[in-house]
Amino acid sequence: MAELSYLSIKPLKESFILNRSASYYTSAYPKVDSWKLDGPAGGDCCSWDGVECNSNTGRVIGLDLSSSFLYGSIDYNSSLFRLHHLRRLNLSDNHFNGSQIPSAIGNLSGLFQLDLSHSVFSGQIPYEIVQLSKLEILDLSGNDNLQLRNPSLKSLAERLVNLKYLDLDGVNASLLVPQSLANLSSLTYLSLRFCELHGEFPNEVFKLPNLQILHASFNTFLTGRLPKFYKNSSLEELRLASTGFSGELPESIGNLKSLSFLDVSNCSFSGKIPTSLANLTQLTYLSLAKNEFSSNTLSWVAKLSRLTVLNVGSTNSYGDILPSLKNLTRLTYLKLCENHFCSQIPSWLGNLTGLTTLHLGANQFWGLVPESIFTLIKLENLDLAFNLLTGTYKLESFLNLKNLKWLQLSGNKFSLVTTDVMNATVPKLTILTLGSCNLFEFPHFLSGQDELELLDLYGNKIQGFIPKWIWGLSAQTLQVLSLTGNLLTGFPRPAVVPPWTNLRMLDLSFNKLQGSLPIPPASIYQYSVSDNLLEGEISSRICNLPSIAVLDVSNNNFSGTLPPCLRNLSKSLVQLNLQNNSFRGSISRVCERGSQLREIDLSQNQFYGDIRRSLVNCNMLEHLNLGNNQIEDTFPSWLGRLPELKVVILRHNGFHGAIGKPKSNEFPKLRIFDLSFNKFEGGLPSHHFQSWKAMEVVDLAKLYYLETRLDFRARGTTWEHSFPYSMTMTKAGVITKYEKIQDFLVAIDLSSNRFEGEIPEDIQILKAIQFLNLSNNLLSGPIPSSLANLTQLEALDLSQNQLSGEIPQELTQLNFLGFFNVSGNQLKGPIPQGKQFDTFENNSFEGNQELCGKPLSKKCYPEGPSPPSASLSQRDEGGDSWFEFGWKAILLGFGSGVVNGLVLGYLFNPIKHKWFVKCFGRMLQNRRGRRN
């Protein structure tokens, strides 16, 4: 034994604290506890556990202290860095308490292997690591707070040219993937998951001659396309899930004959799924889920007999479930959800006896649930939700699957019958959705469930009081509870304070609940009791909810003033909806500094007074609705300094005075501006038009909605959810409720005020406007022909003003114009003819004594023929457009996410909101760090 090695090893043992919680793996044990420091020479360190010596020189060449309960930090002067002959160093699965990797690591220049994974290092990776030029294995994964900036990934690739194994999972690189990675010709394993990479992934990396494993998943901004693959490729695993990879899967992917694991889920791949995938006969794991593939069948799957995991959810697949799938007898995991399968569920699924996960939700399966499903005794996750299944079933039939953890049956056409099942025989569920299953009572077995994380009973016929035992259900685990859309009338007497310690979302909306507002537990994140019969004042105890982000008490009978402490919640609140109650008083300060509020809806109440800069700290605010109150104030121009504001609705109040010139570039993101039914006067706010940049252009390429997207963590799970904004405004002369607002909707409503003067020519700047309502004012002068430049215009209302002159012929160029009203003015001359103008009726023009021409009976030229009248079909066609879907009741679409999880989807219909667990989404387990 070399004396230097012993002198270096001895103090190393004494430098660490041993803590059993410092290591995660079940095989962990304190290796250094066995090191003996007694004896004449202090013991032979080469015989110690985890120490490897050169048999000739006795020098320490390997040190494996992985999973050894080590806790603390490694100092720059640690004796570890005097082991100059060290070739292998493994300190993985310990807890170095967020300390940095010492720069002295560069002293170990002989290292071939360095493994510091999952050991709670943080900060910048030292530049000296690139001095370890002999490194073949480098694993820094699982350290959430490590950063790779200087050196960069480019530096590593250029200096560590002997690398065979590189794992940086979870290391924050925040940079482009360098082309130099393609020069690491010895590389067999490359993993860059969760690295916040961006830019385009180099195609040449896929072609590295020895590369067997390539992981780049969960880099949202990383783009790329798959290359043409050749038959000599050695790739065995390819994981690109949740990245921006796009284009088609190449037919040459069938050349990867060694491939056993392929995951390209939640990307942007398109085109046909190549049938050459059938050549990949070594595949055991295949996930193509959540892409943009064109319609296809699954006939190519038949030959993949080794598959244990098949996920083709949301791949635009259709037809029957092919009988060829019955040959995949090794399957343990099968997801076909969110597709267009239209058939009965085949009984042969019961032959896949190894299945632990079966997801068939969100398709068009019809008929009865086959009895064979109930023989799959290994099932842990069963999803049949949102299909067309019929029949009547005993809930007990499903609960006889003793290993079941997830059960999703919501949204079918069948009925469930509850029975008094003995609790001892019922599996412990974590996810249960029984929405719209024609239940008339709470299932009795629930009272014995103590591991539920999500329970959804929406849209049933459960009536009466909520039983007291519900409030104690799964007290330590429940995170989401939805009872929305039932016939519930009240709460236990006396009132019970729910003991839930992890409840994040509670939805009691669309019931018949009476009494005062129940206060949820302090852990709550989203709370909705909208559309009930609750009354009285909101208790100040609502302010004891430190994490609440969404509070919706709209459409009840609440009254009184708002608790002043609401403003203290603005640092956690994201959405506040108090619409359609009887709240009164002035709107005091709503936002504190650091406010997170993005939507405030106080409409249809009895608020009065002024708003006194009450929202000046709401810097994140996107949607503001103060409509239908009794507020008396001048125009709050300071709102224009809120940088994210997109929707401003002040309709039906007592706002008054002129709208002055802007002091700076205000309202840069404004898309909807409604000041109707107030007492504003002076000229139209044309000086503001130059600042309203979001009204100048519109992107119709994709359908987006104005909404808040939120996520939160609870018990190792990340839940993601979206909350759409809603509003009421006048569309084409009709008061219309928008349950969702398209991101491209641009509307200005200044009607029913006292604006005067001419319509400014500058309004043509706002080229994205679809609705423009200036009616019932004191506007005068001509209708500007420049309105013809508003090519997206669908509704134009200039009625009940003092406009004069002729209607510009140029307005016939407005191809989307479905509503036009200039009645009650002083216009004259001929009404323009042709295109959309042939569809407008008399009431669009009445009250203008000197107007003539169709559709009016007054002819402009006595001898001239009248243009033919428009047919009814023409009028119908003219009134419809690509925008019509915007104001009808729309169901929210499915959200995006990763394949190994779930998300809560939020559907709207005119009767109820519905929670359900979706096929895809974002339930990310504690993926990188197991510790803080």
Image (spheres, helix red, strand yellow):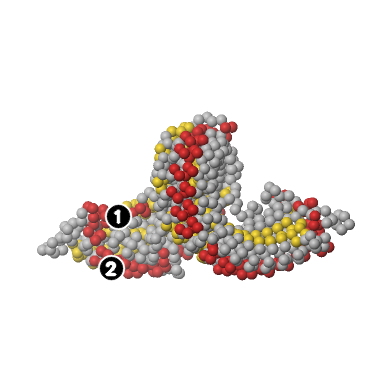
Q: Is 313 or 767 nearer to us in this picture?
A: 313
Spatial CA distance of label 1 from label 2 is: 24 Å
Determine whether, in the image, residue 228 is placed left or right of residue 77. Answer: left
- Contact check, label 1 and label 2, Cβ < 8 Å: no
Query: Which image quarter is the N terminus in?
Result: bottom right
Q: Is residue 226 visible?
A: yes
Q: Secondary structure at mark 1?
A: loop
Residue at left 34%, top 56%? 883
Determine whether, in the image, residue 12 is placed left or right of residue 723. Answer: right
**Residue found farthest to the front:** 232
Q: Is residue 435 visible?
A: no
Rendering quarter of residue 96: bottom right
Residue at left 59%, top 64%? 173
Q: Which residue is mark 1?
A: 880
Q: Which residue is mark 2?
A: 785
Give the crowd class for mark 2: few <14, some 14-19, many >=20 residues within 10 Å.
Answer: some
Rendering quarter of residue 496: top right
Indicate whether 517 appears above or below 820.
above
Indicate whether 584 appears above or below 618.
above
Query: Which image quarter is the C terminus in?
Result: bottom right
Q: Is 845 or 117 nearer to us in this picture?
A: 117
**Percent x, y of residue 766:** 36, 66
Q: Is 914 or 675 nearer to us in this picture?
A: 914
Q: Secondary structure at mark 2?
A: helix
